[in-house]
């Protein structure tokens, strides 16, 4: 499967080849091979230079599908036409828990590209542990309150 036009394929291949030539010692075939097809991974296990490259290609429209954790949704401008959330729970040190309303909103909020889409779509998958009730709860819940950890320290006298 290839998600790219012929023009996009050529542009992307040139970009990936250039990146590979500069970073061949840090990238693996498992990361690079899908890039040529417009598919990428973005998660904590991917080196920052590779994540930045994926983000750039995605923003340029050369990557069409990104398999990601919530790290993709945090703080960068990478809206998508559709966001698929494969699980409504999150693994923690003490086991699995339902996403918070804010975590769900942050990931779902990437659906719909400003100025390009009139509507964004969010798809959630049903699992044996979570389904329509949990999705409806998260989609309608108020965001969690923000608690700032910022403290201004004035050091002059």
Image (cartoon, rainbow, N blue to C red):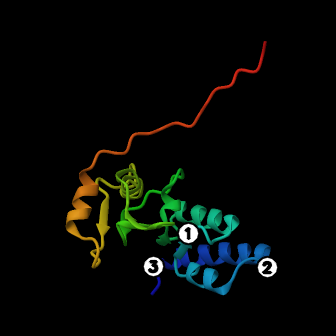
| Helix, strand or loop status at disc 2 | loop
Decide: few, some or many residues near mark 1? Use Cα within 10 Å; few <14, some 14-19, many ≥20: many
Q: Which mark is residue 42?
A: 1
Across and down, in percent, residue 82 comes to 35, 65
Expressed as whole percent of the image width and height from the top left, the position of residue 99 reads 38, 60
Residue nearest the observer in this picture, 56 or 152: 152
Q: Which residue is label 2 attached to?
A: 25
> Which quarter shows the C terminus?
top right
Q: Quick one: label 3 or label 2, which is nearer the N terminus?
A: 3
Q: Residue at x 66, y 86 (%)?
A: 29
Read off the residue under disc 3: 3
Q: Nearer the viewer, residue 111 or 88?
A: 88
Reply above or below: 84 against 155.
Answer: below
- Quadrant location of residue 90? bottom left
Looking at the picture, tell me which residue is in the foreground, 85 or 64: 85
Q: Earlier in the sequence, mark 2 or mark 1?
A: 2
* Residue 62 image offset from top left, x and y in percent: 53, 69
Report how far apart the C-alphas of labels 1 and 3 lie in the structure: 18 Å
Q: Residue at x 51, y 61 (%)?
A: 72
Q: Are marks 3 and 2 in contact (CB under 8 Å)?
A: no
Disc assigned to residue 22: none
Q: CA distance from mark 2 to mark 1?
A: 19 Å
Looking at this rendering, what residue extends furthest in the front direction?
94
**SS state under label 1:** strand
Q: Is residue 155 above or below residue 46?
A: above
Identify the image quadrant of the N terminus: bottom left
Q: Is residue 56 left or right of residue 137?
A: right
The local crowd at label 3, few if under 14, some if 14 to 19, many if 20 or more residues have their Cα within 10 Å, is some
């Amino acid at each position: 499967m290839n998600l790219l036009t012929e023009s996009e394929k050529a542009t992307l291949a040139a970009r990936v080849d250039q990146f590979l030539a500069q970073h061949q010692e840090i990238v693996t075939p498992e990361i690079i091979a899908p890039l040529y097809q417009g598919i990428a991974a973005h998660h904590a296990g991917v080196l920052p230079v590779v994540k930045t490259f994926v983000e750039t290609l995605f923003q340029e429209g050369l990557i069409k599908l990104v398999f990601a954790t919530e790290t993709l949704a945090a703080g960068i401008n990478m809206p998508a036409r559709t966001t698929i959330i494969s699980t409504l729970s999150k693994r923690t040190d003490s086991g699995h828990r339902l996403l918070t309303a804010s975590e769900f909103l942050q990931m779902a909020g990437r659906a719909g590209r400003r100025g390009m889409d009139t509507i964004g779509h969010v798809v959630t998958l049903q699992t044996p542990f979570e389904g329509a009730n949990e999705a409806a709860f998260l989609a309608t819940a108020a965001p969690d309150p923000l608690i700032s950890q910022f403290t201004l320290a004035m050091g002059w006298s």
